[in-house]
Amino acid sequence: MSISWMINATISTLLLPPLNLILLCALGLWLRRRWPRGGLTLSVAALIMLTVLSTRMGASLFIHPLEKMNPPLLSAKAAGAQAIVVLGGGRISNAPEYGGQNIPSAIALQRLRYAAKLQRETGLPLLVSGGRPDGASESEAAGMARVLRDDFSVPVKWQEDMSNNTAENAQFSSRVLRAAGVQRILLVTDAIHMQRAKIAFQQTGLQVVPAATLFTSAARITPADFLPTSLHMASYALHEWLGLAWYWLRHRNPTS
């Protein structure tokens, strides 16, 4: 298992809900001994934030701006791309219904489904990117290629199987693509992740046409969307905002 992946996962866990808000609530309770009103206010605010972010409408406050950055692709054929790149999005290990194989996560599967659609429309060669951040014997790329071949009848020309994060997806994939003479790509990932992925690939010198999928904030609003259910989507969106902030800090021009 990658040490850098473990470090990044630990930092993300501390900075993102629910743990960051739980710690904030605990801090407020501790501060009540010296500042009763301030400590109580901090704890209540943390619980309110936890509740709001657990609703789909609360999560959309962070998801919608990310998804607006890269609208849906209107015409894959008109994009002028030379290849399709689809990024890994995690996996489910030891799936019993598949004989103990590792299978793509729900998000990864949607990325693969859209990549298959684009490949059929354009006939472009396809690259899958994903390593072994969880220490598994098989790379994410190998599992993705198998699903595209067996479940979607789509061929995969290249497998990039060394990357453990989005920046490495871009770094290692660009080497394979440049060796094949590819300069312009259709980049497939979900809409929440697209902006950060696009920046990472552009920094390698590739021309990127965003081909985003899974626009969750466009779904019809129902009364259940105002009830707290899960923090998963809010945490995912906040992870992307933190990632964009980190990219900006690393690559901003200090003279500007």
Image (cartoon, rainbow, N blue to C red):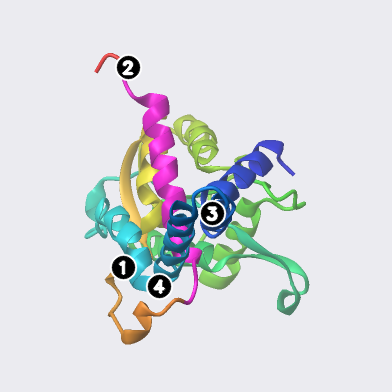
State the residue position of label 3: 32
Q: Is residue 95 above or below residue 154?
A: below
Q: Position of residue 115 (x, y in %)?
A: 43, 60
Mark nearer the N terminus (2 vs 3):
3
Which quadrant of the rendered structure holds the N terminus?
A: top right
Question: Marks 2 and 3, Cα distance to the nearest angstrom?
Answer: 41 Å
Residue at the image position 41 percent from the left and 33 percent from the top: 247
Mark earlier in primary sequence (4, 2): 4
Labels in figure, total: 4
> Is residue 74 among the parts visible in the rendering?
yes
Which residues lie in the magenta part?
Answer: 229-253
Gap between marks 4 and 2 measured at Cα = 39 Å
The amino acid type of the residue labelled 1 equals Ser
Whole-Å distance between the Cαs marked 3 and 4? Answer: 29 Å
Q: Circle 4: is it few (<14), some (14-19), or many (20+) Cα within 10 Å? A: many
Does the magenta-highlighted stretch encompass residue 157? Answer: no
Please identify, in this view, whether the residue under mark 4 or under mark 2 is nearer the observer: 4
Residue under the image location 26 percent in, 50 percent down: 69
Q: Are marks 3 and 1 in contact (CB under 8 Å)?
A: no
The answer to whether residue 205 is visible is no
